[in-house]
Amino acid sequence: MTRPVVIIGGGLAGAEAAWQLARRGVGVELYEMRPQRATEAHATADLAELVCSNSLRSASLTNAAGLLKEEMRRLDSLIIRTAEACRVPAGSALAVDRDRFAAAVTAEVESLPGVKIIRAELEAVPADGVTIVASGPLTSPALSRSLESMLGARQLYYYDAISPIVTAESIDRSIAFSASRYDRGGDDYINLPFTREEYEAFIDALLAAEKVPAHDFEDLRYFEGCLPIEEMARRGRETLAFGPMRPTGLTDPRSGKRPFAVVQLRQENRERTLYNMVGFQTKMTYPEQKRVFALVPGLAHAEFVRFGSLHRNTFIDAPRQLRPTLQWRARQHIFFAGQITGVEGYIESAASGLLAGINAARLVRRERAVAPPATTALGSLLAYITDPERKDFQPMNVNFGILPPLSPAPPKKIKKELMVERALADIEIWLAAIGEQRGPSPALKVQSH
Ligand SMILES: Cc1cc2nc3c(=O)[nH]c(=O)nc-3n(C[C@H](O)[C@H](O)[C@H](O)COP(=O)(O)OP(=O)(O)OC[C@H]3O[C@@H](n4cnc5c(N)ncnc54)[C@H](O)[C@@H]3O)c2cc1C
């Protein structure tokens, strides 16, 4: 008899991990604190409750979120199967009837042999035994405190401050120029220069843009050192030009002069396929970000792989704390899964729970923990969040920009199709190599309509 694996949190990641463990015959004790203890966003006692949108994003294979779903489908994901059974029409997106979805996941997990759901808060990671920490962005204060002392100072964050990211190939290089301030550091940054007129038009659009209202529990006083750009503009029209958009130490090679203001783009990955807008955290809605940022010289046709945001979000410094297998670097029998690892989004959270479940089962069976190749959507996301070279870590969603580029570079219009082909071929090879079976799986009790 082996000891059951302890899972802390019955959200998207925890429920998926429990399913993967049970399928492999491993016992589970799943601790979920609701309804005894509420979070600021959940409204029910169900597992896998969707706290905001009812969309699990694109179902199309030429979208990275769609590719991740297909990989999860091949790994027999409970979340994907249930979502498909509870689907509501939403164009090319996979949207669900949220109540039916959460109730169905709860019923499935409750009926799994060897899974015991304990409705209680766990205030610390157990001293021994295999554990998966999947307590989410709203991890209870007591557990957060004990994680802080377990991980070490400044290794757990309570808010994210995310700057938008664009693909390198969508930046207009006839306008942008590469340079570091005062030529220190070579040409590390891509600079997007503004004239005064362009700057004024940008500030007008920024001030008028629609913003996402903060949740009641999001106390923005925490962000004095990291203000959203629209708040800076509200405090004074020139604040940005003296802050993140200051042009000091930069000369536009086209004019030979210092621009009135600049947006700096910093390299986001080693392959230089992605760049983030330095200091551009914002609470503008996504469509407004697309519209307003198109006014930045050089970004008129930019492709955004991540939009900016500021959220209440508990997450760890994964590049320093986690292996790509989702094991804690310091103790391999402790796994992290879900939003707390620094992945961003429902599907990403569930996908990390899926791998943590597979690996916890492997550890119990004394097999080596594994991670999918970086050419897959899941593998690339894990490689991204656990890259020890990454500084100033902020959460990341799945997107094609984090997948390794194809070589030789194909024409742009078939690039995504070829990346999908490579990812699906590689996940099959990986599955065969690690000896994980695709099925057969127990039939879902929820009937699709
Ligand atoms: C307000 C808000 C809105 C969001 N909206 C979206 C969105 O629209 N789309 C999107 O893709 N992503 C969204 N996210 C991000 C993220 O995808 C979701 O939070 C997702 O639910 C994360 O999955 P998870 O399993 O990591 O955490 P959760 O689904 O939150 O699950 C964690 C579980 O752990 C439990 N728990 C916490 N502490 C303890 C403890 N000490 N002991 C026992 N149980 C505990 C909680 O009650 C919870 O049930 C949102 C996040 C927040 C905070």
Image (cartoon, rainbow, N blue to C red):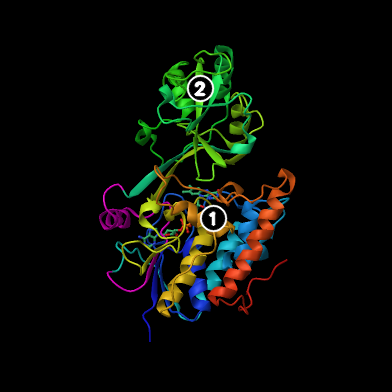
Q: Nearer the viewer, residue 188 or 223?
A: 188
Q: Magenta span has 151?
A: yes
- Which residue: 61% across, 66% down? 427
User: Which quadrant of the view contains residue 97?
Assistant: bottom right
What is the spatial separation of the Cα atoms under label 2 and label 1, in whole angstroms?
31 Å
The residue pinned by badge 1 equals: 380
Please provide percent x and percent y for residue 219.
38, 38
Mark nearer the N terminus (2 vs 1): 2
Look at the image and tell me in which quarter the C terminus lies. bottom right
Please provide percent x and percent y for residue 242.
42, 18
- Which residue: 58% across, 32% down? 289
What are the residue bounds of the magenta stretch? 127-154
The residue pinned by badge 2 equals: 262
- Which residue: 39% across, 50% down? 314
Please tell me whether mark 1 sits on a helix, a strand or a loop: helix
- Which residue: 41% across, 40% down? 218
Q: Magenta span has 18?
A: no
Q: Are marks 2 and 1 in contact (CB under 8 Å)?
A: no
User: Which quadrant of the view contains residue 369?
Assistant: bottom left
Taking 416 as reference, is 72 above or below it?
below
Taking 319 as reference, is 371 above or below it?
below
Q: Nearer the viewer, residue 389 or 337?
A: 389
Give residue 179's mark.
none
Taking 286 as reference, is 43 above or below it?
below
Q: Give the farthest residue toward the bottom.
A: 1
Q: How many marks?
A: 2
Question: Does the rendering let one see residue 59?
Answer: no
Q: Is residue 67 left or right of residue 224?
A: right
- Local crowd size for mark 1, using a 10 Å CA cut-off: few (<14), some (14–19), many (≥20): many
Question: Does the rendering let one see residue 354?
Answer: yes
